[in-house]
Amino acid sequence: MTKEQPFCLVKPSYEKTKSSKIKSPESSKIPLSKKEMYEQALAEIKDRVKEVDSIIPRMATVASVLKNAMPHYFWCGFYFAEEEEMIIGPYQGTTACPNIAYSGVCGTSAKKKETIIVPDVHNFPGHIACDERSQSEMVIPIMDDKGRVIAVFDVDSSQKAAFDEIDKKYLEELMPILLEREK
Ligand code: SME
């Protein structure tokens, strides 16, 4: 009988895999507050992206760390602001619409250059439903140093009114970090 082969035969070049420092809400006896969860998540993101120069892996890291850290997130990810429409970037959660018009929450945030909190997506005219389980949403624009919107970060929850000023504060603090080392 032949010995079972390991599934991955290629040794990864990046061997010093960091384990997450984030305490999962289930493993912690005292539940963390939303503020504490953001503090931990942002510290982890800053640590992980400090040696990463380009925006796509930085975005992928943000989406993954936040989706795994924040229990009220159903979906989170980026849309790039193109001329005619918005195109999906790195995301975590159920499969998203790849191209969306500027009519939805993402497009409105990009056009107004401001964060939009939507407590009930059914009450937002033009809302684009990529997954009908999404009940509330928040979108933060990402602007370059000339004030041009290059992308937005979109967060969805399956609960109504899941996002508030705490989410806004931490996510607005986080977004400029994505562009810090981008040349
Ligand atoms: N709801 C968004 C579309 C993107 S999905 O939520 C992933 C909007 O109205 O722009």
Image: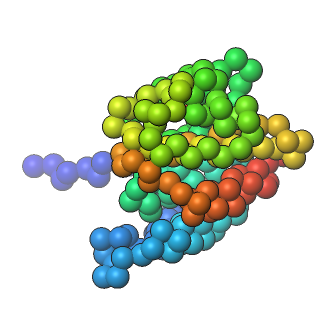
Q: Is residue 163 visible?
A: yes
Vertical order, 84 against 12 (above or below) = above
Residue at x-position 25% and y-position 50%: 5
Q: Which residue appears farthest toward the bottom when viewing the image?
A: 29
Q: Is residue 150 above or below residue 103?
A: below
Residue 81 found in image quarter: top right
Residue 46 image offset from top left, x and y in percent: 65, 65
For the point 15% across and 49% down, the residue is: 2
Judged from this view, the residue extending furthest toward the front is: 123
Residue 173 in picture, x, y percent from top left: 69, 61
Instruction: Name the side, left or right, on which 32 lies relative to 46.
Output: left
Seen from the viewer's position, the closer of residues 171 and 137 is 137
Please identify the quarter of the rendering in which residue 56 is found. Answer: top right
How many numbered discs, if any?
0
The answer to whether residue 68 of the structure is visible from this angle is no
**Is 62 left or right of 183, judged from the image as shown?**
left
Residue at image position (72%, 57%) is: 177
Farthest-out residue, left? 1
User: What colour-coding does the image apply?
Assistant: rainbow
Residue 129: image x %, image y %?
Answer: 44, 28
Q: Position of residue 139 (x, y in %)?
A: 59, 43
* Residue at horizontal 73 percent and vertical 31 percent from the top: 111
Q: Is residue 24 left or right of residue 47?
A: left
Query: Which residue is nearer to you in this view: 169 or 48?
Result: 169
